[in-house]
């Protein structure tokens, strides 16, 4: 959510930042709504002061035996007008909120400007691509040949964009999640959380999924929402809280199931596990001090990268353009892993700094140490990593000519010593 006071003071800067996202100016309309709200509020305050003074005059007149009918009539008229002003103020405030809550966050100045992923800028490449003596196969061909990746049964159970893993592939998926959690908690200072995956409206609103992206979510008949990512409950741990400045940053991680309707993904990645309605992910969230959030983004990205480094999988880091960046982000790094079967890089993690955008929506603050007042925290989130996509990356990068999969050394302690998965 944007600060209307800042927009009022910096209308040109606000519109310029929106233009970098390819959006039309909004400041004039927003300031007009704010002016309506403030005018009604100011008139109501003035009228209430006059009404209070007249009410005292009524008491004084009665005490002195004077006629107070005219004064009583004026007070009654003022009461009616105050009711009108209150309604006008609420209407303008609701309209202002409705306008603000669907405007995306403003990008940092160093974010590349562009319409889509074509304008993303590669920052670095890490590791080497594997070489194969035969044409590398895609993960779904490998998994089905192993007899442990079943899309047909999943479709019978649930429909398209679901998978049923079994045996060693199911264990490999679990091993990946455990390895990620152990690394983030044991070495990188994240606190493991086991959050609910069903949340209320205000929780999705706080992180920006509602109201604009309701069609991308799954909602129960009772009105609860299935989380699209653990970012949602983890970030909302800070909602409505005022924490001490010296307790920042607070870092959380969780492994959860995630659910997305993929409403806008018709025809994309229909085969395999790349784009599923249900998937699992290890998420990282930081509640940070505004002065340290840019450094925290670099740190979070490095934590996600370390998982890929230890798995020995080649990847690249790109900074997303203004047109490819998510709704709540001010800056985002994507980690794109190399998939030999596709002969392409595919996203496996996004790490974003949201500034105070989410904190304003959920009223998350910190007390300034040694001073007065409070400030909004900054929130950051990143995948550390998407477990299903990491499974795909392991399968495709460690495939052998006979269709077997070599288990990366980092995962073998979690696999009971299994070093190869073969038919």
Image (spheres, rainbow, N blue to C red):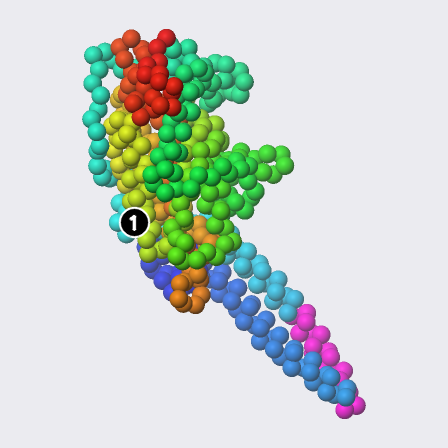
Q: Is 327 on the left-hand or right-hand side of 198?
A: left
Q: Is 242 on the left-hand or right-hand side of 354?
A: right
Give percent across and percent down for residue 335. 30, 34
Span colored in magenta? 64-81
Vertical placement of residue 114 versus 376, above or below: above
Q: Is residue 75 visible?
A: yes
Give percent across and percent down for residue 29. 45, 58
Residue 99 painted magenta: no
Q: Is 85 on the left-hand or right-hand side of 153?
A: right
Residue 66 painted magenta: yes
What residue is rendered at 32% in x and 47% in y? 296
Give percent across and percent down for residue 79. 68, 71
Give percent across and percent down for residue 338. 27, 26
Which residue is labeled 1 in the image? 295
What residue is rendered at 28% in x and 29% in y? 310
Q: Which one is in front, 417 or 245?
A: 417
């Amino acid at each position: 959510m944007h600060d209307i006071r800042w927009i009022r003071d910096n209308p040109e800067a606000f519109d310029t930042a929106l233009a970098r996202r390819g959006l039309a100016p909004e400041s004039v309309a927003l300031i007009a709504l704010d002016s309506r709200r403030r005018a009604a509020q100011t008139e109501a305050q003035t009228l209430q002061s006059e009404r209070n003074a007249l009410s005292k005059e009524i008491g004084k007149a009665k005490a002195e035996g004077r006629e107070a009918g005219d004064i009583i009539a004026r007070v009654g008229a003022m009461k009616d007008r105050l009711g009108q002003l209150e309604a006008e103020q609420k209407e303008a405030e609701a309209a202002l909120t409705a306008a603000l809550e669907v405007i995306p966050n403003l990008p940092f100045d160093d974010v590349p400007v562009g319409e889509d992923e074509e304008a993303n800028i590669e920052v670095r490449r890490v590791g080497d691509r594997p070489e194969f003596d035969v044409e590398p196969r895609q993960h779904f061909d490998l998994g089905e040949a192993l007899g442990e990746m079943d899309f047909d049964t999943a479709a019978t159970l649930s429909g398209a964009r679901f998978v049923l893993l079994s045996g060693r592939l199911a264990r490999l998926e679990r091993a990946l999640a455990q390895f990620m959690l152990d690394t983030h908690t044991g070495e990188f200072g994240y606190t493991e959380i086991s959050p609910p995956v069903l949340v209320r409206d205000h929780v999705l609103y706080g992180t920006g999924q509602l109201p604009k992206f309701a069609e991308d979510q799954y909602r129960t008949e009772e009105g609860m929402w299935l989380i699209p990512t653990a970012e949602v409950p983890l970030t909302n741990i800070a909602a409505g809280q005022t924490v001490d400045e010296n307790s920042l940053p607070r870092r959380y991680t969780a492994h959860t199931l995630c659910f997305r309707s993929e409403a806008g993904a018709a025809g994309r990645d229909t085969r395999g596990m790349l784009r599923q309605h249900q998937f699992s992910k290890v998420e990282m969230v930081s509640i940070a001090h505004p002065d340290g959030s840019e450094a925290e983004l670099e740190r979070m990205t490095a934590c996600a990268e370390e998982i890929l480094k230890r798995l020995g999988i080649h990847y690249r880091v790109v900074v997303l353009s203004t047109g490819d960046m998510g709704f709540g982000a001010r800056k985002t790094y994507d980690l794109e892993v190399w998939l030999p079967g596709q002969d392409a890089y595919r996203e496996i993690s996004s790490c974003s700094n949201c500034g105070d955008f989410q904190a304003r929506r959920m009223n998350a603050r910190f007390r300034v140490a040694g001073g007065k007042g409070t400030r909004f925290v900054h929130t950051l989130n990143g995948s550390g990593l998407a477990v299903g996509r990491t499974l795909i990356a392991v399968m495709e990068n460690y495939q052998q000519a006979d269709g077997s999969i070599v288990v990366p050394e980092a995962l073998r302690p979690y696999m009971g010593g299994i070093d190869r998965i073969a038919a």
